[in-house]
Image: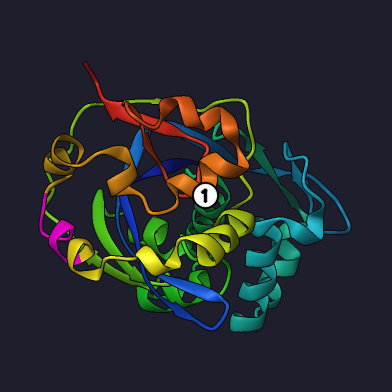
């Protein structure tokens, strides 16, 4: 079994509050089908859960964390048996630390594949709850929506009939640490949040947003990301930032 794990782009991202250590957001997520990882279940004999193609320690890998959450949720011995006779092979194309949700998309795709191949019968609501316990972006990928307004800490997903511009995307060779970007924002820019602007953007199409707002207006994290990753500063006038960076995009000229 092989499936694509597609990237996402945040057309806009506004911070509207905090919830403990987390930040509450209002954002437009779109699926970016042109960029994707590939996940394959390959038959083999092994004694433990194995992932190939990713340079991440197993315990830190979101796919492995998803496997552990599935075992807790289902208490199904089929899981152990299946992954002792199959390994997970990831063909990685979505860059890490790039604001494109690659790890979350991989986790969501693994969850959907496992539910299907083992006929676990977990409905979408429960899949999304499992996903939310793994990462804030995972429920969006489970939804398979082409575009959605995402709120809270990622758990509120509202379908949106969007008009999506043709996008030009690139990722500079720099890693943006998500936690560091959010921490810097909370320390230096939290006082600037504009809830009314965020509410207005929820009702505008993605095409309207990239034409009516500047990149800095569209993403509250841009200044913090550019402070921590100075290479981004030269793009602030022309390119929008996806998530906490470092990927940049604009409407294709």
The answer to which quarter of the image holds residue 153 is bottom left
Residue at x 14% of width, y 38% of height:
207
Can I make out residue 222 in this image?
Answer: yes
The relative height of residue 14 versus residue 102 in the rendered view (above or below) is below
**Does the magenta run of residues contain 194?**
no
The answer to which quarter of the image holds residue 27 is bottom left
67 on left or right of 184: right
What secondary structure is marked by label 1?
Answer: helix
Q: What span is in magenta?
A: 199-204
Q: Is residue 226 above or below residue 106?
A: above
Circle 1 residue: 224
Crowd rating for badge 1 (residues with CA inside 10 Å; few <14, some 14–19, many 20+): many
Decide: is 50 above or below 97. Answer: below
The x, y position of residue 121, in whole percent, is: 44, 74
Number of callouts: 1
Q: Nearer the viewer, residue 12 or 158?
A: 12
Is residue 30 in view?
no
Foreground residue, 46 or 211? Answer: 211
In the depicted structure, whether residue 150 falls above or below residue 39: below
């Amino acid at each position: 079994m092989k499936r694509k794990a597609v990237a996402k782009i945040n057309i806009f991202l506004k911070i509207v509050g905090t919830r403990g250590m987390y930040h509450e957001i209002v954002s437009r997520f779109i699926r970016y089908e042109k960029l994707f990882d590939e996940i394959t279940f390959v038959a083999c004999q092994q004694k433990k859960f194995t992932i190939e193609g990713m340079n991440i320690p197993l315990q830190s890998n979101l796919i492995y964390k998803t496997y552990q959450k599935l075992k807790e949720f289902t208490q199904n011995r089929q899981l152990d048996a299946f992954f002792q006779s199959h390994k997970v092979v990831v063909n990685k194309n979505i860059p890490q630390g790039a604001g494109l949700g690659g790890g979350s998309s991989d986790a969501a795709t693994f969850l959907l594949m496992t539910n299907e191949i083992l006929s676990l019968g977990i409905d979408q609501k429960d899949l999304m709850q499992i996903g939310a316990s793994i990462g804030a972006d995972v429920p969006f990928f489970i939804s398979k929506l082409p575009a959605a307004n995402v709120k809270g800490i990622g758990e509120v997903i509202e379908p949106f009939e969007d008009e999506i511009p043709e996008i030009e995307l690139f990722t500079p060779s720099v890693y943006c640490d998500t936690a560091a970007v959010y921490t810097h924002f909370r320390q230096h820019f939290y006082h600037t949040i504009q809830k009314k602007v965020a509410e207005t953007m929820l009702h505008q199409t993605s095409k309207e947003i990239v034409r009516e707002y500047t990149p800095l207006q569209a993403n509250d994290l841009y200044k913090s990301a550019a402070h921590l990753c100075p290479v981004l500063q030269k793009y602030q006038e022309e390119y929008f930032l996806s998530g906490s960076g470092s990927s940049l995009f604009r409407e294709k000229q």
